[in-house]
Image: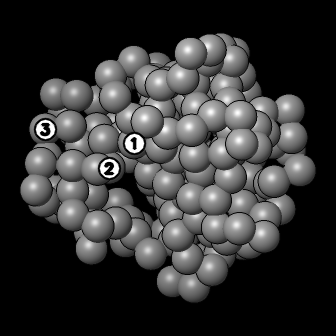
């Protein structure tokens, strides 16, 4: 099993469905070696689908009816009252360093961390166990590469791979 998968998401509905699938898998997965959840790290330009994926992700968790998902651009982090709770970060305004709140959330074993604009912080500040999703533009829909970082994340990606078949596109798109 490779450490990454290439997908083609044709529309917003597919992006939300992928978010829901990831939420069900991450929230029920075996804890990482340090006892927490595998994090979700999102990378892509404005309008690529990051927040849409988070909406689908949060909506699939118990307690979602109490959550209003929006990109936390000005307050850095939103905590959604789901089970487990989701700490949703927007790191767009954090170039060059990870904020203390990000490290605190990663250390909290009760929180499922989702971070948009992960490319704005140094790689050494990323969690050891994560799924890194990187969007790129293609003529039709959105291309997405999912990379597993860490042993637990690799096992999770391997178990999810059959669920992604509807979106798998091998050698049908290339990153520019």
Residue to which mark 2 is pinned: 118
The quarter of the picture where the N terminus appears is: bottom right
Between 1 and 81, which is closer to the camera in this rendering? Answer: 1
Q: Residues within 10 Å of mark 2 (few under 14, many from 20)?
A: many
Q: Going 31% across and 41% down the picture, which residue do you hit? A: 117
Q: Is residue 77 visible?
A: no
Q: Which mark is residue 54?
A: none
The quarter of the picture where the C terminus appears is: top left
Q: Residues within 10 Å of mark 3 (few under 14, many from 20)?
A: some
Asked whether the residues under the numbered discs 1 and 2 touch, taking CB atoms below 8 Å apart as contact, a structural biologist would say yes
Between 125 and 170, which is closer to the camera in this rendering? Answer: 170
Q: Going 39% across and 18% down the picture, which residue do you hit? A: 47
Q: Is residue 84 above or below residue 175?
A: below
Mark 1 or mark 2: whose residue is earlier in sequence: 1
**How far apart are the alpha carbons under marks 1 and 2?**
6 Å
Residue to which mark 3 is pinned: 93
The answer to whether 108 appears left or right of 30 in the picture is left
Q: Which mark is residue 43?
A: 1
Q: Secondary structure at mark 1?
A: strand
| Number of numbered labels in the structure image | 3
Q: Position of residue 122 (x, y in %)?
A: 21, 64
Q: Position of residue 124 (x, y in %)?
A: 27, 74
């Amino acid at each position: 099993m490779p450490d990454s998968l290439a997908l083609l998401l044709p529309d917003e509905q597919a992006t939300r469905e992928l978010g829901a699938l990831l939420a069900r898998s991450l929230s029920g997965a075996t804890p990482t070696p340090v006892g927490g959840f595998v994090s979700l790290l999102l990378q892509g330009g404005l309008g690529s689908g990051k927040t849409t994926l988070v909406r689908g992700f949060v909506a699939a968790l118990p307690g979602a009816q109490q959550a209003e998902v929006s990109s936390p651009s000005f307050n850095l982090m939103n905590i959604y009252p789901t089970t487990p709770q989701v700490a949703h970060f927007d790191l767009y305004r954090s170039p060059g360093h990870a904020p203390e709140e990000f490290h605190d959330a990663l250390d909290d074993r009760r929180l499922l961390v989702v971070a948009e604009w992960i490319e704005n912080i140094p790689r050494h500040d990323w969690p050891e166990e994560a799924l890194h999703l990187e969007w790129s533009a293609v003529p039709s829909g959105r291309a997405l590469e999912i990379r597993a970082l860490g042993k637990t994340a690799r096992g999770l990606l391997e178990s999810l791979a059959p669920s992604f078949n509807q979106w798998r596109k091998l050698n049908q798109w290339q990153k520019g």
